[in-house]
Image (cartoon, coloured by chain):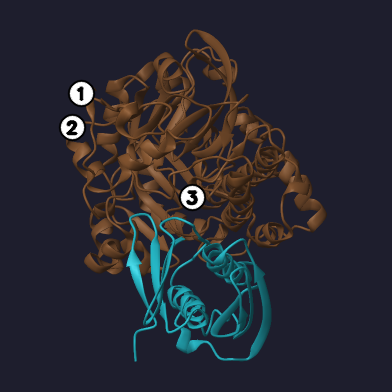
Amino acid sequence: MARWQGQLIKIDDYRWKIPKNYKTGMRVPGLIYASEEMLESICDEQTPEQVANVAFLPGIVGYSFAMPDIHWGYGFPIGGVAAMDVKDGVVSPGGVGYDINCGVRLLRTSLSEAEVRPRINQLINELFHNIPSGLGSEGKIKIEQKEMARLMVEGARWAVKRGFGYEEDLNVTEEGGCLAGADPSKVSDKAVKRGMPQAGTLGSGNHFLEIQVVKEIFDPHIASIMGITEIGQILVLIHTGSRGFGHQICTDHLRVMEQAVSKYEIKLPDRQLACAPIESPEGQDYLAAMACAANYAWVNRQCIAHWTRESFSKIFGKSPEQLGMKQIYDVAHNIAKIEEHIVDGRKLRVCVHRKGATRAFSPEHKDIPRCYQKIGQPVLVPGDMGRCSFIAVGTEKAMKESFGSTCHGAGRVLSRGAARRGIRGGDVVRELESRGIFVKAESVSSLAEEASQAYKDVTEVIDVVNQAGISRKVAMAIPIGVIKG
Amino acid sequence: MKKAFEIIDHTADVGITAYGADVEELFSNAALALFSLITEPESVEEKLHLDLEVSSEDRDSLLVEWLNELIYLFDAKHILFSRFDIKSLTHNQLRATCYGEDFDPMKHKIKLGVKAATYHMLKLDKSGDGCKAQIILDI
């Protein structure tokens, strides 16, 4: 693909602006958070063009943002954030992505590396056995159609009521694990049919469950409030989304939006940016269906967290309580939410699209759990399975600048095909094992696609958002055991 | 014989370029390309057939809808297809009979979970000696 040749204006070492006059039709400028080195790979693809294209969308306010883990997506880039005025703006399924409420959940334990390492094989095998994963995997929970409607409305609480996890998990889940406004009548029969058998499954692709060891604590005070108290402490990170259910909802509504674009005479530079006014029936229907998928994804992570606790309990012969298995937080990184933000000095209700981006609300924000009021919302940033993951918190600067948003992960640099051609799945397993990371996957060949070389280094990503001030890094953990679909 | 399709690389996902002497053949080859990504089509026998009808706004989106219908049938009903007989095709409607069998984990290797056909970089060209389409799939 041709290198992007457009104009980027340096604001400071971590901020680059695409001026509004770069393309006729842009309503706001673009803003890319990146270091000078990262810009190289960002411009290698046409990603900045996508940032500029998003700026065409009606009602967009502030900037069309790109986080440092940005890479090329359909229509919207992955790592993109865009806020639209609810009054005259649009909502776009492409600004959320196919895997609605793909996100991460982090559990802590009171176990140490010394206790877990000797049993890591056993533990990973048990988790692999207990948590359905892989392509076409079907869940252990059998759901009838009527029950599915309840699940869509109630979200994670639906699972807690059925004995999967605890009430207190809900307090430390974004939106309490239930996005309001979910309306199952806006979800197609096809989506329900894809979703029913897949509830409570990890899935495939880049989804995973990792056993991690805390390696560095950058801010001991903030970390301790999250229950991260020492180097060597064991954490569990779960990364999954809404499976075929979310994909079908996105597919269905993109089709509706295709027609809405001509109905409302919206001019778009890319068909995949299809959208409709937020307050139109098409826009409201999408938001109601999207909320169903978001809630489904929270059920998914709630169930998987439960089976994780169960597996630890079995291997270590102690209850989850005795093992200190509390949830630190759960964040969505593919979602659109109606939020209130200050724009040009006045309060404005906006629809914030975060596609491969994480909410990062500041301390004292009303929408974050009471236990985190003093430190800000936990932000969970997974890296690839061979490197590390970060825990950060939201900041006041993020509220002022990026609609309370930050990065979501590492971001791909190699296509899956290129990774498969250059790397062998078996080699990845051996290489990771030689570094003390035990991996179990449904498909070994697909592991090559997820090898470290295929991703940006998440350390560079987190350093940019930390330096730019839109989040503050708190701790870093490395994997010692991974299960993948 | 001209090749039926090619697989193209895309950073986060994967795409296909399908060819055909006419649009019917192109639609059939695009479906074949899809199932060649999901499994080894040679391992799929023609044990069942299904009549499908897909409609859309225009021909480009018809191609997207057609592939999305097949993705749905695999994901929700676990059916793999290996042959597609396009019965009729207008600019916004398609009728086809699809031949294949139920997914059997002992027999079929699943290579890739394709979750959606997208409009991204969608291109459908007709030229003197045939047609060609490019489509990106979300995996």
* Element carrying mark 2: helix
- A434 over A180 or under it: above or below: below
Q: Which residue is mark 1?
A: A13
> Residue A173: in sight, yes or no?
no
* Element carrying mark 3: helix
Left or right? Give the position of A376 relative to A449: right
Image quadrant in which you'd find residue A464: top left
- A352 over B16 or under it: above or below: above
Image quadrant in which you'd find residue B1: bottom left
Q: Which chain is in cyan here?
A: B
- The number of numbered discs placed on residues in the rendered structure image is 3
C-alpha gap between disc 2 and disc 1: 7 Å
Looking at the image, the residue that sits furthest to the front is B128
Left or right? Give the position of A19 relative to A281: left
Q: Which chain is in brown here?
A: A
The amino acid pointed to by label 3 is Gln
Residue A481: x %, y % from top left: 38, 52
Q: Nearer the viewer, residue B83 or A312?
A: B83
> Residue A299: in sight, yes or no?
yes
Image quadrant in which you'd find residue A260: top right
Q: Are marks 2 and 1 in contact (CB under 8 Å)?
A: yes
Q: Which residue is mark 3?
A: A272
Q: Which residue is mark 2?
A: A36
Residue A119: x %, y % from top left: 40, 53
Comes first in the chain, label 2 or label 1: 1
Looking at the image, the residue that sits furthest to the top is A345
* Element carrying mark 1: loop
